[in-house]
Amino acid sequence: MLADFKPVLSGILAFGEKMVKALVCRGPHTVAALVLLLVGLVLAGSGLARAASLVVDAETGQVISADAPNHLWYPASLTKMMTVYVALSEIEAGRLSFDDAIKVSAHAAGQSPVKFGLKAGQTITVREAVNAAIVASANDAAVALAEKVAGSEPAFAERMTAMARSLGMARTVFRNASGLPDDGQVTTARDMAVLATALLRDYPEHYPLFNQRAVTIGKRSRGTVNSILGSYSGADGFKTGFTCGSGYNLVASATRDGRRLIGVVLGSANRGQRLLDMTALLNRAFAAKADAGVGLAELASVVTVADTGTAPTILSGGACRAAVGEDGGTITSAARLSGWGIVFGAYPERGKAEQALKSAKGSLGQLVKGGRPAIVQKAYEGTARYSAMLVGLDQQTAGKACKALWEKQAYCLALSPQVLSNPDSVWR
């Protein structure tokens, strides 16, 4: 394994030599911090790192600890931090107000769970949309807000990426406002720390939005999905995120003795582990001596071969089936399919695929409890069609489900994990 790793190690050490020479005048603590960062990158390159993390001093920008900080990752609902940042920039510029009305579109109302339950044609305020996106991680609210600002979600996503570049988020690309799975939507632990720092720096008066414990729209209320707000002393804001591709993500900010730290955890195995990971990171960082060290801007240059390529898929199979209720929703990428799957047909329109999926789920009931809904676009003889599917099942459940549908004269095809994971596979 080390033989395969030598080119990466050589590149890192060469960069480290240049950085040490440039930074040695800043003192031994700076050099020591850089060495620790390089060691973290070496471990990431060796394939030993399963997750990414970073802790930074919010005031000085000093990176206190980092593990795979520039490795590409799927942001999941951490995306909504940028959705809100762009909205706040519009409010600051006078082009938008918290009191402005938003008419919820069918596209926004039709977003996959988690969502607030907004209805097409319903009117909400910008403030309600912001609160629901932050507190309840509501995908429908995030998309409604995006459409209000930019006219369409794709146009808003372009704004998000442009804003990311202007803030110095070197490797982040946004494709939607919610964080629902998209292979092209990626970030890094470093970039998310940059965004969190920007929110604190640029809109301090609005930072309390990220410390709310509940949100109400009309007669419906939702509690916060961010459990660290109540479990860690001094924690007062930012965001959670989850998809099967990303694992469990968290950006948190906390203060102790007048010192504010920002922590980022990407790819924890479950909610509890995510909380433990962040707690340990912050505890170690608060206990560390506050020396001048490598900054976020300098860290952007430490990108190795190990940080290139596609973002990892963290959870699959049973582990992913057990992940319920944060940002899961309907799978739309073939790269996210796992376990055994059953397909109910392929349709020329997504809406018809959604109807078929809903009908099949209703017919099968508890028999497919734990299955993940999926609508995946595939090309058949040059024509795009949408496959209505349930995935993340075991072989026995997939077989029983298809048998039940066959008895009702309905179409069903069971697909093995090998078929689902093969990008060249075609089913209909």
Image (cartoon, rainbow, N blue to C red):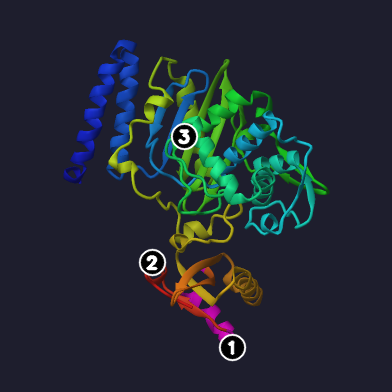
Q: Quadrant of residue 213?
A: top right
Pointer 1 local density, CA inside 10 Å: few below 14, some 14–19, many at least 20: few
Q: Give the range drawn in magenta.
A: 391-410
Looking at numbered disc 1 in the image, what kind of residue is underneath it? Glu
Say left or right for 132 vs 305. Answer: right
* Residue positioned 29% across, 25% down in the render: 35
Looking at numbered disc 2 in the image, what kind of residue is underneath it? Pro
Query: Residue 4 location, x and y as percent?
Result: 19, 46
* Residue positioned 30% across, 18% down in the render: 31
Q: Residue furthest right?
A: 219
- SS at mark 2 in the image: loop
Q: How far apart are marks 2 and 1 (CA)?
A: 31 Å
Q: Is residue 398 a member of the stretch shown in magenta? A: yes
Q: Is residue 5 a member of the stretch shown in magenta? A: no
* Residue positioned 28% across, 14% down in the render: 24
Give the mark nearer the N terminus: 3 vs 2: 3
Q: How far apart are marks 3 and 1 (CA)?
A: 54 Å
- The dot on residue 169 is 3
The secondary structure making up most of the magenta span is: helix
Looking at numbered disc 3 in the image, what kind of residue is underneath it? Met
Is residue 234 shown to the viewer in this render? no
